[in-house]
Amino acid sequence: MPGTSPADAVAVVFGELPGLPFLPELPGRGPGADMVGRTAALLVDLPVETTTGGWKLAPRPGRDQRRAASMLSADLDAAEEAAAGYAGAFKIQLCGPWTLAASLERSRSLDPVLTDPGAIAEVVASLAEGIAAYVADVGKRIGGATLVLQLDEPALPAALAGSVPTASGLNRVGAIDAAVASQRLASVLRAAGAFSVVHCCAGDIPFGVINKAGAGAVGFDLSLLRDREIDLVAQAAEAGTGLLCGALPTTDAKRDSPASHRDPRQTAAAVITLWHRAGMPPGTLTEQVVITPACGLAGTSPRAARAALAHCQEAARIVPELIEEDPR
């Protein structure tokens, strides 16, 4: 989300999405509020610090990690206050293990953790422990909520394809085996002990890896879905996997509102079309699909972010009406 005030962002989220509010990320506050920094601050016995390019493993805890932890605590304070008396689903989101491994530099090298299998194992184990403690903390703070954990994995397709660059940019990290990718991801999801979503707003969404990891739902950018991936969507849906369908484009994030040129009926119709193409019964769409923006809204204005959330909420409301008009 845009802005720097946790209280303001939480108020917008609870106001526009009363059925599925979430803990906002506010990267505009700087290092530590970003996806990687927020997650890295949760690592157990693996200190981190900022670099000119992002984050790296460090020899000892320092100011950067403390700042990230402090901002996350402030975010939770705001959510706890807004959620007083709330009973329902509440989503928290963090960086997934493979995107974290592709984004964190090793302590004695500029190359990403992804280049070192031993370092990957350490980061994944530490992340699993840290996320388990984090989920427990959020559960205590918002006692009436049913927690949903979203792991953002935009770098997972690149890790599987062997296209993550090394520090020099002249080489690429070797491709990660799909079975290993599923196993590592599964270990983090199991440790969390909450309903889980794996979100990937990149192309070549690895539905198979995500499903085998045991995720309860998968989130994706509908505009990047290719024809040959429709069968994968169908397989996921038939297996009971939920779909967070990024049907509202956010590529025009610098405009006043990514929803300004689209009617909610258009967004709803795009999701229904996907469901029809996947060969799924129309009546099950509202049980398995959540309509979302395609990716994050941090690059928009506060007004645009609010409009995008309201747009998705309205599109979801319209879906049953459109299905009734054209049940096929």
Image: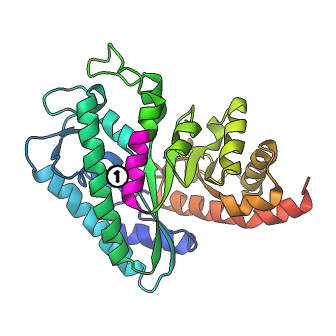
Which quarter of the picture shows residue 107?
Answer: top left
Which residue is denoted by mark 1 in the rendering? 27
Q: Secondary structure at mark 1?
A: helix
- Image coordinates of residue 204 in percent, x first then y, are 57, 31
**Residue 41 magenta-drawn?**
no
The kind of residue tagged 1 is Pro
Residue 113 screen position, x and y as percent: 26, 32
Q: Which quarter of the figure has residue 306?
A: bottom right
Image height of 50 relative to 33, above or below: above
Instruction: Residue at the far top: name it.
Output: 170
Q: Could you say which quadrant of the image residue 75 lies in?
A: bottom left
Q: 239 and 277: which one is in front?
A: 239
Which residue is pictured at 69% across the width and 43% down the height? Answer: 235
Residue stretch rendered in magenta on the structure: 183-193
Q: Is residue 93 above or below residue 20?
A: above
Q: Residue at x 39, y 77 (%)?
A: 142
Report whether 222 appears left or right of 80: right
Q: Quadrant of the N terminus?
A: bottom left
Residue 38 in the figure: left or right of residue 161: left
**Residue 8 placement, left or right of 30:** right
Residue appearing at x 35%, y 70% in the figure: 138
Dominant SS in magenta: helix
Tell me if residue 71 can be seen: yes
Residue at 58% x, 58% y: name it.
Answer: 308
Locate residue 224, reporting x and y percent. 62, 36
